[in-house]
């Protein structure tokens, strides 16, 4: 075998070995991994970042005989339409933030927003009922005062806080989007909010 032929065969052998080694190395390399997504430091693991604390307020209607169904419907309306406040009936013998009583006069209530541990009063007056106003709307309206909403009189039936100015034919007991947003804003910082109840008593006579 001539020297020239031997060198050619040696060169081919080296090329085959290098190609094989390169292919083996490429196959053995681990596949690139995707780094896990960063978890927001402001939100607990497993909780949405936008979740806000829910403030629970207890109400006592033990002295509101004859209004139980209207109060339950008014409470259900608020619970269904605001996200960061929940109204629950107080257990017997426990302190409630919202004390509801039945009276013979015009409906009236302390203007909130009431905070846990504080207290406001709601009076559901039969004088409004005798003049034809809807009991559920009255109850929901007065609870709106407890949550910090003033009257918006005069106003349309679509505004819960327009109260008696909407007329006796109005039976709407659902807060509109603006009213919902105002309550949620008042309780946006949970129980730690520094927004205090106004303390005025608002009488809902025409």
Image (cartoon, rainbow, N blue to C red):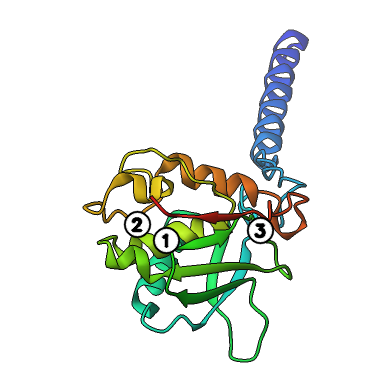
In primary-sequence order, the first of circles 1 and 3 is 3
Instruction: Report the front residue among 15 and 127.
Output: 127
Q: Residue at point 25% right, 51% down?
A: 170
In the figure, residue 106 lies in which quadrant?
Answer: bottom left
The numbered disc on residue 53 is: 3
**In the depicted structure, whether residue 32 falls above or below residue 61:** above
Q: Which residue is most to the left?
A: 169
Upstream in sequence: badge 3 or badge 2: 3
Residue on which the image places disc 2 = 173
Determine whether, in the image, residue 199 is placed left or right of residue 72: right
183 is higher (above) or lower (below) than 1: below
Q: Residue at x 41, y 72 (%)?
A: 71
The residue singled out by tag 1 in the image is 140
Disc nearest the viewer among 3 and 2: 2
Q: Residue at x 39, y 38 (%)?
A: 154
Badge 3 marks a residue whose secondary structure is loop
Q: Relative to the observer, which residue lies in front, 94 or 108? A: 108
Q: Please rate how many residues cluster around mark 2, counting C-alpha atoms within 10 Å: few if below 14, some from 14 to 19, many from 20.
A: many
Pick whichever, 20 or 140, lies toward us: 140
Residue 112 location (% of width, % of height)? 63, 55
**Drawn side of residue 183 relative to residue 137, left or right:** right
Q: How many marks?
A: 3
Q: Residues within 10 Å of mark 3 (few under 14, many from 20)?
A: some
Sequence-first disc among 1 and 2: 1
Marks 2 and 1: in contact by CB < 8 Å? Answer: yes
């Amino acid at each position: 075998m001539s020297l020239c032929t031997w060198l050619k065969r040696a060169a081919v052998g080296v090329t085959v070995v290098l190609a094989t080694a390169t292919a083996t190395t490429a196959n053995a390399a681990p596949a690139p991994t995707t780094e896990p997504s960063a978890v927001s430091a402001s939100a607990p693991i497993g909780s949405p970042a936008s979740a806000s604390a829910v403030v629970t307020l207890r109400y006592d209607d033990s002295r509101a005989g004859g209004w139980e169904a209207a109060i339950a419907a008014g409470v259900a309306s608020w619970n269904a339409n605001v996200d960061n406040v929940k109204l629950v009936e107080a257990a017997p013998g426990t302190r409630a933030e919202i004390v509801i009583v039945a009276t013979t006069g015009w409906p009236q209530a302390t203007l909130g927003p009431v905070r846990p541990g504080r207290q406001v009063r709601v009076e559901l007056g039969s004088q409004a009922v005798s003049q034809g106003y809807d009991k559920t709307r009255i109850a929901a309206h007065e609870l709106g005062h407890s949550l910090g909403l003033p009257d918006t009189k005069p106003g349309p039936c679509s505004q819960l806080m327009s109260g008696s100015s909407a007329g006796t034919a109005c039976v709407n007991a659902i807060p509109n989007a603006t009213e919902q947003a105002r309550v949620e804003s008042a309780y946006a910082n949970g129980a730690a909010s520094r927004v205090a109840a106004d303390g005025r008593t608002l009488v809902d006579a025409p």
